[in-house]
Image: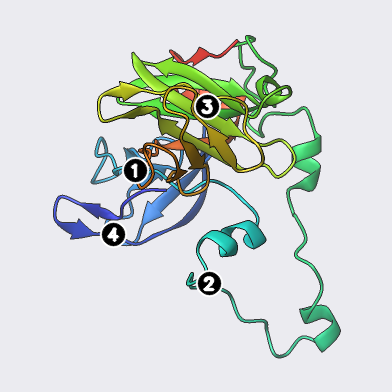
Amino acid sequence: MYSRELDGETYTFGVSGKLLRDALLMYDHQTRSLWSHITGEAMAGELKGKRLKMLAGTPRINWKDWKRNHPLTKVLSVPSDPRRPEKLRQDPIVDNYAQYHASPIAGISGTRYTDDRLMDKALVVGVRVNESYRAYPFRSFRRRSVINDEVGNAPVLAFHDLKSNATAVFLRTVEGQTLTFEQARGYTVKDTTTDTTWNLITGMATKGKLKGHTLERLPAMNIYWFAWARYHPGTTIYK
């Protein structure tokens, strides 16, 4: 998720249909510059070298859990085509990339990628703290859904639930105190430092000494390893 504001101007974006390093490029309608959706940087055009501000997105969760925590949420939906038969309008959305997701092929360019620290199509949680990058393979969350770690000397809490695919990364420092978290129970976790209970969807403390405080959310994304590593070759991997 990125801010559309840059140098006092607000831009609108579309899908260019082009790829760079086998990853999608956006374009802005105002200058037709091409932007990486992974880094937010303009790769070609009038704004080449400019970078959009990455915003810390909310955890990836299902609608039921989101609505429970944010009951006043407004939903952006695309109306069905009234010309289609009613039965077809109610059909579930088809994933046009299902075959690609199931394939070991990393892209369409045919370029062989050499970073073999992980399999090309291994899924990771990619995290950026300032200019430090770290990848958390999904397999790291098999035994526990939260990881206490450091990225670029910043203490972080990485959360990923394999069952729901929910993901969030937070700084685990509150009022100058670094917290350590125990195993989560669903979307709830307790820190062993202050015995406070936290909501992993909102990042807010719901019970205990730090009740009312909110953990700072960091930019993170669920992404294939090959795409993350091609744009961030210096990334470290959690082991």
Give, as a three-letter code, the residue at label 4.
Tyr
Report if residue 47 is visible in the image: yes
Pointer 2 and pointer 1: residues touching (CB < 8 Å)? no
Give, as a three-letter code, the residue at label 2.
Val
Pointer 1 and pointer 4: residues touching (CB < 8 Å)? no
Q: How crowded is mark 3: few (under 14 residues within 10 Å), some or many (20 or more)?
A: many
Residue 38: x %, y % from top left: 46, 37
Which one is earlier in the sequence, the residue at label 1 or at label 3?
A: 1
Give, as a three-letter code, the residue at label 3.
Trp
Residue 72: x %, y % from top left: 48, 72
Q: Residue 114: which quarter of the image?
A: top right
Which one is earlier in the sequence, the residue at label 2 or at label 1?
A: 2
Report if residue 122 is visible in the image: no
Specify the label residue 81 is tagged with: none
107 is higher (above) or lower (below) than 154 = below
Specify the label residue 213 is tagged with: 1
Q: What element carries label 4?
A: loop
Compare residues 204 and 72 and report the one nearer the observer. Answer: 204
Mark 3 or 2: in front is 2
Residue identified by numbered label 3:
228
